[in-house]
Image (cartoon, rainbow, N blue to C red):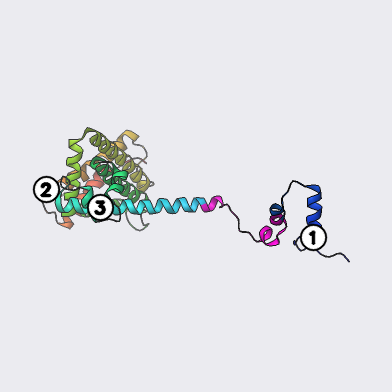
């Protein structure tokens, strides 16, 4: 009766046959080849590609969290003492990173301002693409509510002070100013895409694409004007703000194409 193979290599006959056919193998090599524990129980020495991907993703997430901590600390400094008095030393005191690590990531204050502008931009983009209109809410009321929430969120002393400091920094630097203009143009494009998505099925398709873009710019200009008025210190009753947004949007978006 034949024995079923168990995966264990038996000594000494098998080792003798290997030595006969491969005389160049030394005793240590033969021992490793025929040691059942080393052959069958040794853990893999390489990592799978999926493990490497997960490690990279985890490292990227850790880096993003660190950068967010740094930018939060920078905003607190700007809010309290202004951008000109904010230094990497002061930011480092509020974070888990050293001043040297901050300089490796941002190089100078202009790079820090750019990172703050980039984060604000990405937040706005994410909010636009996560928006979904409930079926029981009229499209104009829904868009007016979105714009109202954005305006009220932006109009607070801390946010206004930080945005003003960043705006002044862009005015002093042509490179930052050009970067800010590109961001503004991109936000208008995303606003256009958002309005198209929300207005699908609620508009007149006979109007031209150019007319629709003009309406989008009108919405952006209206928001910019309201933002300027509210940041200048003029208080708007919330009911009046809702009325302004709803009536203005009704006129601007009337017969807008999809």
Residue 87 versus residue 94 in the image, above or below: above
User: What is the CA distance from the residue labelled 2 to the residue labelled 3?
Assistant: 33 Å
Residue 49 image point, x, y percent: 55, 50
Closer to the eye: label 1 or 2? 1
Residue 158 image point, x, y percent: 18, 54
Q: Quadrant of the N terminus?
A: bottom right
Query: Residue at label 2?
Result: 232
Q: Quadrant of residue 137?
A: bottom left
- In front here: 240 or 202? 240
Residue 249 versus residue 213 in the image, above or below: below
Closer to the eye: label 2 or 3? 3
Mark 3: few/some/many CA within 10 Å (<14, 14-19, 20+): some
Residue at the image position 81 percent from the left and 50 percent from the top = 20
Furthest toward the bottom, the residue is 1
The local secondary structure at tag 1 comes to: loop
> Residue 12 — which label?
1
Look at the numbered discs 1 and 2 and tell me whether their residues touch, using CB distance below 8 Å: no
Furthest toward the front, the residue is 27
Q: Quadrant of residue 203?
A: top left
The local secondary structure at tag 3 comes to: helix
Q: Which residues are magenta?
A: 31-51
Residue at the image position 35 percent from the left and 40 percent from the top = 257
Query: Residue at label 3?
Result: 92
Residue at the image position 25 percent from the left and 47 percent from the top = 250
């Amino acid at each position: 009766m034949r024995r079923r193979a168990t995966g264990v290599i038996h000594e000494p006959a098998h080792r003798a046959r290997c030595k006969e056919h491969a005389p160049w193998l030394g005793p240590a090599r033969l021992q490793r080849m025929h040691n059942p524990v080393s052959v069958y129980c040794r853990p893999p020495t390489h990592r799978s590609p999926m493990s490497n991907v997960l490690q990279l993703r985890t490292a990227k997430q850790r880096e993003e969290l660190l950068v967010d901590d740094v930018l939060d600390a920078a905003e607190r400094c700007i809010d309290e003492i202004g951008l000109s008095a904010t230094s990497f030393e002061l930011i480092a005191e509020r974070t888990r990173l050293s001043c040297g690590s901050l300089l490796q990531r941002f190089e100078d204050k202009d790079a820090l301002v750019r990172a703050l502008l980039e984060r604000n931009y990405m937040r706005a983009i994410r909010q636009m693409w996560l928006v979904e209109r409930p079926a029981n809410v009229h499209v104009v009321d829904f868009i007016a509510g979105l714009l109202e929430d954005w305006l009220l969120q932006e109009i607070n002393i801390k946010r206004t002070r930080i945005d003003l400091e960043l705006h002044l920094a862009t005015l002093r630097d042509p490179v930052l100013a050009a970067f800010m203009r590109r961001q503004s143009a991109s936000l208008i494009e995303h606003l256009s895409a958002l309005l198209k998505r929300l207005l699908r099925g609620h508009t007149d398709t006979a109007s031209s694409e150019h007319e629709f873009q003009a309406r989008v710019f009108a919405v952006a200009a209206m928001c910019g004007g309201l933002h300027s008025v509210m940041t200048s210190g003029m208080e708007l009753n919330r009911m009046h703000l809702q009325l302004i947004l709803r009536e203005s949007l009704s006129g601007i978006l009337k017969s807008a194409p999809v």
